[in-house]
Amino acid sequence: MVAICIAAFAIVSCEKTNGPTPPGSGDDSATVEPGTDSTIVKTSMFDFEVLEIDPAYIKAKVTPEDQQLKYFWSAIPKAAYEGTYHSDITAAALATVNLWKESFADYGYMSFEEMYNDQISTGTQTSTFGGYTQMTELYLLAFGVDETGTLTTDVEMSELYITGKVEPSDNTFKILLVDETIIRVEPSNDDPYCFYVMPKEGGFDNYDSPEAIADEYLEVNASALNVLITSGIDQRNYFEVFETYGTGTYVAFAFGAYAGARTTDVETLEIEYEEYVPDPEAGNGFTKLTGDVAFEASNAYWEDGMIDYSDNASTVYLAIQAKSSYESDETRLGLYIQLDNMSKFPYNMQGEYQVSSSLKAGTVVKGWRDEDYNQDGSYYYEKDSYSWDATIDSGKLTITANGDGTYTIVADLYDVDGNSISTEYSGMIEVSEDW
């Protein structure tokens, strides 16, 4: 069963998932707050009983008068009930059913019927509705609905409930940089928390305090906290943040968080990051080859956007493939080609390209391995190999347009020891879907 919600409501997670959370219905009936004894709210067709109230969720039980009735039930925040549905609980129910009919595919169902059968209940049911922030006002609602999506009963709702208030946590955090862009957090206990990283200048320094950053982080990311909040030792790779802002000082921060509220002080760690700048001259070629190699190419494709080696040229990747032992196409040559004009790519690729470390347009980027054994640039794979067998050190690549949409590629390349790496391919050059 798939947990489903609609944009107006908090994300719902249930022991039995109850589909798109309809907007809560409510009136000025009694309010049930955390810590009160469980009470059963009786309506004409459903009995609602709250079993547990937490700052982030409510656990409840519903019992229909007719144990054979097919019905849907859920929790709905008061704000959605009054704001989105203008206190019209029937409108909320109809919106839920219409969502099943119109958007079943978005939730992984093949048909309305499949979604209906997965969301409908019979008999007494117990569910946990979660993803709320502290002190959220909400209602439970239930209504009968048949296989055509027609409501078969009035829409009935419970009294008003309020989720709990978050208590402070004594959790503390040790923040570590375990790799260039990987941040690890070691908490003192298993209470939930969040962590993130941002540039110091123009980011972290713009706030009055670390706590101000944490509070804004919770507010801005309120709808995604079920994904962002973690517990126990955790680490994440923030390479996209570092690549976006480049070389400079960053601040990683961690803080306790639950049900949309901060539960601890904020721990921070300053990090110095130096952006990687590809430089073929910064490393040396390497090879495992002991002699010349040639292979029969079976396929080739282009891909753009993987990397740009220079601000003065655009880089496209050309993979030349051959059959593996399993008769599938596998890449044998991975060549990075520097272009000065992408407007007509891939139809302007014919020409002769020399292997070079200059990164200039009209060249194939030379391959290299730096002192940290990071490999970059153009490379060669042996058959069925799972690691580079040689970097491309010199030679040339010739591409000729055949006039019928096909191309002829002639690779006359060499590794650092002067071993020849050669192949010829004639046919279509596919364009990767990433282009």
Image (spheres, rainbow, N blue to C red):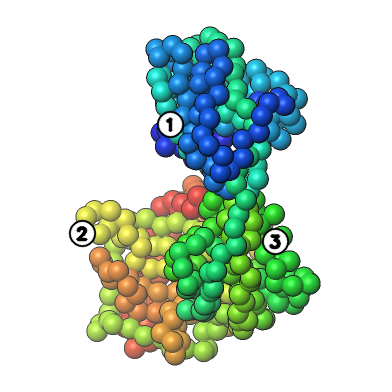
Instruction: Pinpoint residue 393: horizontal percent, then vertical percent.
Output: 43, 83
Can you say whether 361 is above or below 145 in the image? below
Which is more foreground, mark 2 or mark 1? 1
Residue highlighted by disc 1? 126
Label ID, residue 227 = none
Q: Nearer the viewer, residue 75 or 224?
A: 75
Q: Which residue is mark 2?
A: 325
Lower position in the chain sequence, tag 2 or tag 1: 1
Q: Nearer the viewer, residue 138 or 334?
A: 138
Q: Give the quarter of the image for residue 325.
A: bottom left
From the image, tell me which residue sits under label 3: 215
- Amino acid identity at mark 1: Thr
Q: Position of residue 211 (x, y in %)?
A: 70, 68
- 328, above or below 94, in the image: below
Q: Is residue 376 visible?
A: yes
Q: Secondary structure at mark 2?
A: loop
- Kindly state the secondary structure of the residue where label 1 is placed: strand
* Above or below for 425 versus 385: above
Residues tagged 3 and 1 counted as in contact (Cβ below 8 A): no
Is 435 left or right of 64, judged from the image as shown?
Answer: right
238 vs 308, nearest the viewer: 238
**Furthest residue in direction left, as rendered:** 325
Find out whether the residues at labels 2 and 1 contact each other: C-beta distance under 8 Å: no
